Image (cartoon, rainbow, N blue to C red):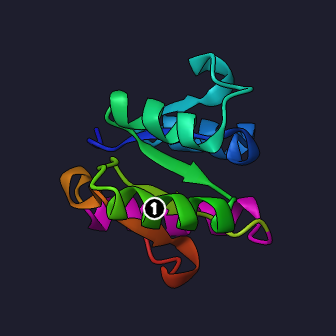
């Protein structure tokens, strides 16, 4: 069982990807199930933090800005992973699994990771 707890925002809540991650032992929550479907990006990041979850998103621009703004304001988050929309499900799954197997949950605190920087290694 993996220790990473993931929170998929609305734009990244791809059923097939989330299902594959759950089958691999990852604890995944999507915004709809969290009751946060209409929440702002800032509120979703706060909710992910409150539940000690890594926020997973396709929204590079807004979450890069939020990451920077939160750190400048002295606020902490549980971590953000940005997945390029152009990746197919296989690429997303392999790269995300690689990242999550290499980086421990506590190492994600106040960190933003861009999945495009990770290989598809198993």
Q: Position of residue 16 (x, y in %)?
A: 72, 42
> Is residue 92 covered in magenta?
yes
Q: Residue 35 at what x, y percent from top left? A: 63, 16
Q: Is residue 84 left or right of residue 82?
A: right
In the picture, which quadrant includes the N terminus?
A: top left
Point out the image quarter for the C terminus.
bottom left
Where residue 70 sits, quadrant-wise, is: bottom left
| Image position, residue 17 (x, y; %) | 66, 46
Residue 3 in sight from this viewpoint: yes
* Rendered residue at 27%/64% (across/down): 103
What type of secondary structure mainly makes up the magenta span?
helix
| Mark 1, secondary structure of its residue | helix
Q: In the drawing, does residue 88 fall left or right of residue 100?
A: right
Residue 75 painted magenta: no
Number of marks: 1
In the depicted view, which residue is nearer to us: 14 or 108? 108
Nearer the observer, 52 or 15 = 52
Residue at x-position 65% and y-position 69%: 91
Q: Residue at x 65, y 67 (%)?
A: 60
Give the residue at x 53% y 77%: 120
- Residue position for label 1: 69
Q: Bounds of the magenta span?
A: 86-103
**Is 64 on the left or on the right of 51, as rendered?**
right
Q: Is residue 77 above or below residue 102?
A: above
Q: Name above or below for residue 86 compared with residue 90.
A: below
Report crowding for label 1: few under 14, some 14 to 19, many 20 or more residues within 10 A (C-alpha). Answer: few
């Amino acid at each position: 069982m993996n220790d990473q707890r993931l929170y998929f925002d609305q734009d990244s809540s791809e059923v097939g990807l989330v299902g594959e991650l759950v089958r691999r032992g990852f604890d995944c929550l999507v915004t709809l199930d969290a009751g946060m479907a209409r929440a702002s990006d800032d509120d979703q990041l706060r909710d992910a933090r409150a539940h000690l979850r890594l926020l997973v998103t396709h929204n590079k621009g807004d979450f890069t800005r939020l990451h920077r703004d939160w750190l400048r304001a002295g606020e902490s988050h549980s971590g953000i992973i940005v997945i390029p929309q152009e990746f197919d499900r296989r690429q997303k799954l392999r790269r995300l699994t690689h990242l999550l197997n290499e980086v421990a949950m506590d190492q994600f605190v106040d960190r933003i990771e861009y999945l495009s920087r990770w290989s598809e290694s198993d």
